[in-house]
Image: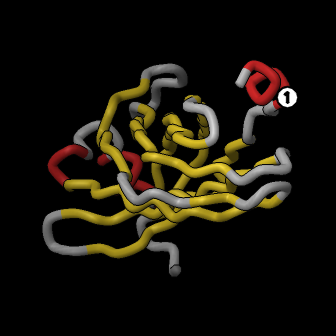
Amino acid sequence: MFVLTSCMESPVVDLTRVRVGGIGFEGATLVAQLQVDNPNRIGIKTDSVTFELQARESGAASNWTRVADGAYSQQFEVAGRSSSRVDIPIELAYSSLRTPVRAIIQSGRFDYRLTGQVFIRRPIPKRVPFTQDGSISLFESR
C-alpha cells in the first residue's frame, strides 16, 4: 500500500462554470459545473462533494456572506488518465439573498465565491479542495 500511496498524484478539481438551473417562486437552483481530472493510471471513485456559496456585499470589496451550503452525495467515478464533468445543484432560497439583493435589483447580477471539497473514496481516501470567484446573472439562459 505504501508504494500506491507514494505514486498517486492528486486529482485536479476546477470549477468551470456556475449557471442558473431554474427560478421558482421561493428560490433558484444554481448549477456548479466541476471538472475532475484524474492524472493516475487507475480510476478514482468519489464519496461526495461539499460546498459553500458566498455572496459579496454590495459596495464592499472584501465582505462575503454565506448564502447557501450543502453536500452532493451522488458518487461518481473518473477513469484513469481521464476527466469527468459533474453538475452540482445548489438550492438558493430568496430569503438568503439579503446580502446580494441590492446588486441583483440594480443589475440582475451578483458576485459569488464557491468553495468546497471533493471526497475521494477509492483507491485512497483524500479530500480535494476547490474555490472560485465569479459573477452570475439570475436572468441568464441555460
x then y, percent, for residue 105: 34, 56
Q: Which colour scheme is used?
A: secondary structure
In the rendered image, which quarter contains the N terminus? top right
**Camera-side residue: 95 or 82?**
82
* Figure disc tally: 1
Tell me: 78 left or right of 7. Answer: left
x then y, percent, for residue 136: 52, 57
Work out whether residue 118 can be spotted.
Answer: no
Give the vertical position of 83 relative to 23 (above or below): above
For the point 34% across and 45% down, the residue is 71
Tell me: 60 left or right of 27. Answer: right
Find disc 1 in the rendering and name its residue.
7
**Camera-side residue: 73 or 56?**
73
* Residue ranking furthest to the front: 1
For the point 63% across and 40% down, the residue is 123
Give the vertical position of 135 relative to 53 (above or below): below
Badge 1 local density, few (<14 within 10 Å), some, or many (20+)? few
x then y, percent, for residue 141: 51, 80
Badge 1 marks a residue whose secondary structure is helix
Give the vertical position of 142 relative to 61 (above or below): below
**Camera-side residue: 111 or 2?**
2
For the point 23% across and 41% down, the residue is 98
Question: What is the quadrant of residue 120 in the picture?
Answer: top right
For the point 45% across and 57% down, the residue is 75
* Amino acid type at image mark 1: Cys
x then y, percent, for residue 32: 51, 57
Question: What is the quadrant of residue 51 in the picture?
Answer: top left
**Camera-side residue: 100 or 134?**
134
Work out whether residue 67 can be spotted.
Answer: yes
* Residue ranking furthest to the bottom: 141
